Amino acid sequence: MNTRYSDKNPLILRILGIAGKTVILGIACVFTAFPFLWMVLSSLKTKADILNTDVFFPPDPQWNNITSILFDSPIPKYIFNSMWVSLAIVALQIVTGAMLAYAIVFLKFRMRRVLFAVVMATYMLPVAATYIPSYIILADWGLLDSFGGLIISSTVSIFGIFLLRQAFMQIPKGLVEAARMDGASHWRALWEIVCPMTKSSFITFGLMNFIGTYNNYMWPSLITKTSDYFLVSQGLRAFFVRDGAYGTEWALVMAASAVVVIPLLVLFAFTQRWFINGIGGETGMKG
């Protein structure tokens, strides 16, 4: 009898543990998803319904709020600006980050560790401390108020260098050495051997930096003044604040915010498998 009870006891504890984790995660999901759900529902309400705290679901969905944002506002243009600028920046950051991480991990040269220490030390600087020198450089090059200035000023990501270096360190150096002995260049070894084996890290890095660039407000607002070059964050502010246009139309504010989030949701939906998996278990050497 005691043996049977002891056999069931671990099973009961396991069930209770799973139930407890499910409840905790469910509560966390509710609190996490509620602001987004409230934003979407508010985008379908009238201004009076939004200000009425007794109304949660829209009694009469106002789909014209969404169509107004899509066809009668500059929001789609700002989204397009943010998307292509973010893609260009992420592409450059991946190339520069991968090359420097490859050099630090696989190349042998003096002061290699010092170089990495200096690179990481710059990560400790407050971002605001770089604004003035970066602004002066862009002004000297004539790149203020332009897409070129936005892209060139964000060519290198210290976070990306660190992330890719950590991923490259999990790759057996024998693979790269063997490729080099077979006549492969460092460039070919990087993109045909190292990159495929650390694919998840590249996707994680690209996704995180894309989101950061897409939502960036402070730096683009400092160097761009023409609305044609606005990214989505500063475009939203200009659209709803300037001259009071739509300043109190909270339904349109919520509709625009919901539309702005859609590209990020689609991007994450296609990359979540690699983003979650990371680089665990992807590297190894057989022989």
Image (tube, rainbow, N blue to C red):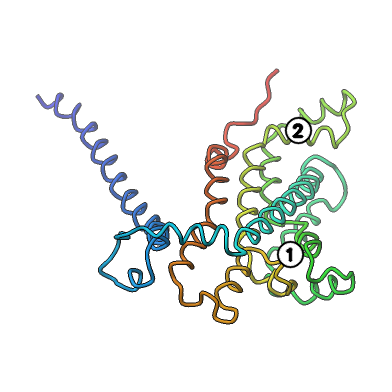
- Residue marked by disc 2: 173
Left or right: where 179 falls relative to 7 = right
Cα–Cα gap, marks 1 and 2: 28 Å
Residue 93, image x, y percentages: 75, 52
**In the rendered structure, which amino acid carries the disc numbered 1?**
Thr
Q: Is residue 154 above or below residue 162?
A: below
Residue extending farthest to the left is: 1
Residue extending farthest to the bottom is: 243
- Say whether marks 1 and 2 touch (CB < 8 Å): no
**In the rendered structure, which amino acid carries the disc numbered 2?**
Lys
Residue 67, image x, y percentages: 50, 57
From the image, state whether disc 1 or disc 2 is nearer to you: 1
For residue 122, which numbered disc appears in the image? 1
Residue extending farthest to the top is: 287
> Measuring 42% from the left and 62% from the top, which residue is drawn there?
43
Left or right: where 181 falls relative to 278 = right
Q: Characterize the local packing of mark 2: few (<14), some (14-19) or many (20 or more) Cα atoms within 10 angstroms.
A: some
Q: Quadrant of the N terminus?
A: top left
Residue 7, image x, y percentages: 20, 26
Q: Is residue 209 above or below residue 178?
A: below
